[in-house]
């Protein structure tokens, strides 16, 4: 393999559509990018069965890490990580920790991935809490929501680090110069908010190495008002799920309205090219998954219902993350604080 080859473990057993979706995503990614090697972690017989129907792909860049155990979504995460040593999540993350791979991508149990990230891959020195940070579409491009599920009972110092790591990600991965950072609040005024927001606001305001622009209300998030949106995990998860749900409902209503009458069908035919472009811009699967920032290796969590396209983009996220040295930059930045 060339020296610049990036090795990525894909959890073949994680998610509602496993093993079909992760295995197909791996094949699609290998056929599109020449500088990656993929290790499919999971039950070897199941993986081979799907591969047999996937057509041609560079077999020399794909291998299987046999992992006969599966961590189910409903299992207690800590117990699952401790007891299921032969699961795809544990074996895949262990390979990342040991340097056998650069990244791990999974649609499996969020809890197990969060626990495994901290226990197996481990945090970078100085990182207080690793946040989940998905990129999602807005009217002006894309924004990063940090945290959306990792640290529910966050403290002010955690949110400040989230803002710093999120700024690094947006600048180096998405190329946003001096990304605008805002904290989720129930009003624009500085004196508003709950205790956490009120304590965090002046810390962010005084932070010299981020471009803090103040509070952001939920209704302003889709407009692209901020590039990095900071909040604790409970709020972030609610925002993300509502965002996705409203988008899905709206697109369903538009399609239903256009198909309900002959005039609507004609109009739909005329606007179809423009509508497809808009739908693609607001398709969250185009952005891959949510990286768990601040770890010694990269871990990306895709939706539990992810199809092959979303998982493939999650793989591509890992490539860009590695090429831009995000781990090293975050480690150097946090380590110097």
Image (tube, rainbow, N blue to C red):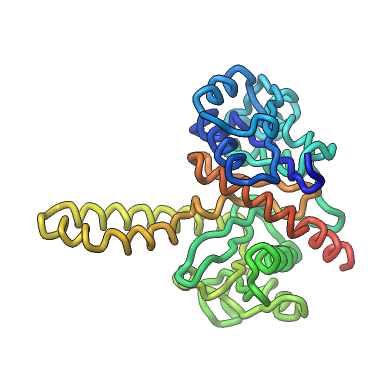
Which of the two residues, 329 or 8, is positioned nearer the viewer here?
8
Q: Quadrant of residue 237?
A: bottom right
Residue 336 image offset from top left, x and y in percent: 89, 67
| Residue at 74% in and 60% down | 324
Residue 207, by quadrant, is bottom right
Determine if residue 242 is in view: no
Towards the viewer: 167 or 118: 167
103 versus 200 height, above or below? above
Question: Image height check: is 3 above or below 204?
Answer: above
The C terminus is located in which quarter?
A: bottom right
In screen coordinates, is 331 left or right of 158? Answer: right
The extreme top residue here reads: 45
- Residue 152 drawn at (x, y percent): 64, 53
Please indicate, yes or no, whether residue 105 appears anywhere in the rendered image: yes
Location of residue 62 in the rendering, given as x and y in whole percent from the top left corner:
67, 31
Give the farthest residue toward the left.
Answer: 262
Q: How many marks?
A: 0
Q: Nearer the viewer, residue 84 or 315?
A: 315
Q: Classify the position of the N terminus by image quarter.
A: top right
Q: Is residue 289 left or right of residue 220?
A: right
Residue at the image position 56 percent from the left and 43 percent from the top: 311
Q: Residue at x 55, y 40 (%)?
A: 28
Question: Where does the image place residue 193, in percent across and percent down from the top left?
Answer: 58, 72
């Amino acid at each position: 393999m060339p020296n610049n080859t990036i090795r990525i473990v894909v959890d073949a057993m994680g998610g509602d559509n496993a093993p079909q979706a992760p295995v197909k995503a791996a094949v699609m990614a290998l056929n599109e990018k020449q500088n990656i090697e993929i290790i499919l972690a999971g039950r070897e017989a199941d993986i081979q069965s799907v591969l047999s129907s996937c057509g041609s792909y560079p077999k020399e860049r794909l291998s299987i890490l046999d992992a006969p155990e599966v961590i189910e979504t409903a299992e207690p995460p800590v117990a699952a990580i401790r007891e299921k040593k032969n699961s795809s999540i544990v074996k895949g993350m262990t390979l990342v920790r040991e340097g056998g791979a650069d990244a791990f991508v999974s649609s499996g149990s969020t809890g197990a991935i969060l626990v495994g990230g901290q226990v197996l891959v481990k945090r970078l020195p100085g990182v207080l809490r690793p946040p989940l940070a998905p990129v999602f579409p807005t009217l002006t491009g894309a924004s990063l929501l940090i945290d959306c599920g990792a640290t529910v009972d966050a403290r002010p110092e955690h949110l400040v680090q989230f803002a710093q790591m999120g700024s690094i990600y947006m600048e180096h991965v998405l190329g946003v110069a001096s990304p605008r950072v805002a904290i989720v609040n129930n009003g624009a005024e500085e004196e508003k908010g709950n205790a956490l927001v009120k304590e965090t606001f002046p810390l962010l305001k005084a932070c010299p190495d981020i471009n803090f622009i103040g509070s952001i209300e939920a209704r302003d998030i889709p407009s692209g008002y901020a590039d990095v949106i900071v909040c604790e995990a409970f709020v972030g998860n609610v925002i993300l799920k509502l965002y996705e749900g409203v988008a899905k409902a709206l697109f369903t209503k538009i399609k239903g309205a256009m198909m309900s009458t002959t005039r609507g069908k004609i109009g739909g035919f005329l606007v179809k090219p423009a509508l497809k472009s808009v739908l693609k811009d607001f398709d969250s699967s185009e952005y891959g998954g949510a990286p768990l920032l601040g770890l010694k290796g990269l871990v990306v969590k895709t939706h539990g219902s992810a199809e092959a396209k979303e998982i493939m983009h999650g793989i591509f996220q890992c490539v860009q993350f590695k090429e831009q040295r995000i781990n090293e930059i975050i480690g150097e930045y946090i380590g110097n604080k």
